Image: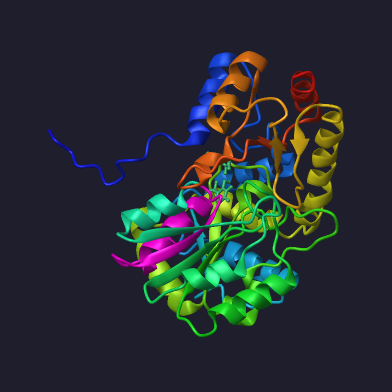
């Protein structure tokens, strides 16, 4: 059978590849972004309780009502934005499904979607599957700032969607209130929609706050805002996220969502709804991860790796140009095989494989894991 691939240039993702290599080599896996510690016992107990209490059949298509209400409350308290749980909040199978449904809902064949690079790996392939054209624009290096001039120049009559992701994976860049103003002014004369992937909304450091699209009324009106409980509650394997969007956008998103999964895991939705009532659980996250970032940085002092600034997310970029001139992918694989630490080469997040001689390390790990990894990295 001769099959014509819809994604001929795509293989297994870098996350699968590096995690598999780490397992084969017995390396410490700081590549794929997931914690090596468990979620709170209370949250696990809640899931078990809701299972025991019979919450085991299909949830409503847009999500369990109690969970959508708690999400609405949280969004109002944190960002001053009122979303109607009935018409504007949808619970999805992780952020990934929300991103897939949003892109599929609005990108028509021939539409352009601007993708800020380095870009999380799923954006461009999903745009292509919809017949759209991903248009990459790079963050400035090494400040990782958006270049407004360049962005403005890329907006054209075919631009349908702008894909943003702040706090940004893999650079740790965050947006400021001024950035939101710039963005709103730039988009004002256009009909461009925004898909804002804010899965790291609660992982922002150094006293900074998260400025997401819902904090700005004009941007809120044209945005799908996507988040996930994976990063917030140390549950990447549970795959529950959500999408906030004005009713008109949500209607279209749900048309797609209902045919991808229809609805999401019922007992876990109930458990998150109950757990969300304790605001400390997400409000303490910046301090929790900042301690890990700072520990990892202090453990790397004296090494030839040079850290870049990390203002949010749980990833740290290390410049290895004092150690080697190998391309990122080669160095990442050699580091895993020869030194026993796996990391992600950010060049895979650029369409043209821009290579700054950096590697991304996930520090959502136990202290002992970070110490063991740093011991291997320091002498290199
Ligand atoms: N977007 C970004 C930027 C991510 O880093 C990730 C990985 N957690 C996702 C989306 C996917 O989130 P989820 O696991 O909830 O699908
Ligand atoms: N978001 C995770 C990361 O950036 C990986 C998720 C996945 O494996 N698809 O590492």
Residue at left 55%, top 43%? 238
On the rendered structure, is 336 left or right of 77? Answer: left
Q: Choose between 249 and 178: the one closer to the eye.
A: 178
Vertical comparison of 5 with 19: above or below: below
Residue 254 visible (yes or no): no
The reply to whether the magenta stretch includes residue 108 is yes
Q: Choose between 203 and 107: the one closer to the eye.
A: 107
Residue at left 46%, top 53%? 123
The reply to whether the magenta stretch includes residue 341 is no
Q: Position of residue 344 (x, y in %)?
A: 59, 34
Residue 348 visible (yes or no): yes
Quarter assignment of residue 22: top right
Residue at left 73%, top 67%? 176
In the image, farthest residue toward the left:
1
Q: Position of residue 154 (x, y in %)?
A: 47, 68
Badge count? 0
Q: Quadrant of the C terminus?
A: top right
Quarter assignment of residue 220: bottom right
Q: Magenta span covers which residues?
A: 93-120
Quarter assignment of residue 228: bottom right
On the rendered structure, is 277 left or right of 69? Answer: right
In this picture the colour scheme is: rainbow
Q: Position of residue 338 (x, y in %)?
A: 63, 14
Q: Choose between 320 and 196: the one closer to the eye.
A: 320
Q: Quadrant of the N terminus?
A: top left
Q: Position of residue 93 (x, y in %)?
A: 48, 51
Q: Choose between 46 and 311: the one closer to the eye.
A: 311
């Amino acid at each position: 059978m001769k099959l014509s691939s819809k994604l001929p240039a795509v293989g297994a993702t870098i996350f699968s590849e590096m995690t598999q290599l780490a397992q084969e080599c017995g390396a410490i896996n700081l590549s794929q972004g997931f914690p090596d510690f468990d979620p709170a016992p209370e949250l696990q107990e809640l899931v078990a309780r809701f299972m025991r209490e019979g919450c085991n059949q299909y949830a409503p298509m847009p999500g369990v009502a109690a969970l959508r209400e708690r999400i609405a409350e949280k969004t109002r308290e944190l960002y001053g934005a009122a979303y109607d749980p009935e018409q504007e909040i949808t619970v999805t199978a992780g952020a990934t499904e929300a991103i897939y449904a949003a892109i599929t809902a609005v990108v028509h064949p021939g539409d352009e979607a601007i993708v800020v690079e380095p870009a999380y790996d799923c954006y461009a392939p999903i745009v292509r599957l919809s017949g759209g054209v991903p248009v990459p624009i790079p963050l400035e290096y090494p400040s990782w700032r958006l270049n407004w001039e360049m962005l403005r120049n890329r907006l054209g009559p075919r631009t349908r969607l702008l894909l943003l992701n702040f706090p940004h994976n893999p650079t740790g860049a965050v947006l400021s209130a001024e950035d939101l103003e710039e963005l709103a002014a730039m988009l004002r004369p256009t009909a461009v929609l925004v898909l804002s992937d804010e899965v790291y909304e609660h992982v922002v450091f150094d006293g900074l706050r998260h400025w997401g699209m819902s904090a700005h009324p004009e941007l809120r009106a044209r945005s799908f805002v996507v988040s996930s409980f994976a990063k917030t509650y140390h549950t990447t394997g549970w795959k529950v996220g959500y999408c906030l969007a004005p009713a008109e956008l949500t209607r279209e998103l749900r048309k797609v969502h209902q045919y991808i999964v229809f609805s999401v895991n019922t007992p876990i939705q109930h458990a998150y709804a109950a757990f969300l009532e304790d605001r400390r659980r997400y409000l303490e996250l910046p301090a929790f991860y900042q301690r890990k970032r700072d520990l990892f940085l202090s453990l790397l002092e004296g090494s030839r790796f040079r850290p870049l600034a990390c203002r949010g997310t749980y990833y740290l970029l290390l410049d290895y140009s004092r150690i080697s001139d190998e391309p990122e992918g080669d160095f990442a694989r050699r580091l895993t095989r020869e030194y026993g630490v796996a990391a992600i080469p950010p060049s895979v997040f650029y369409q043209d494989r821009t290579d700054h001689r950096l590697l991304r390390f996930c520090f959502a790990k136990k202290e002992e894991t970070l110490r063991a990894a740093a011991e291997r990295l320091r002498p290199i």
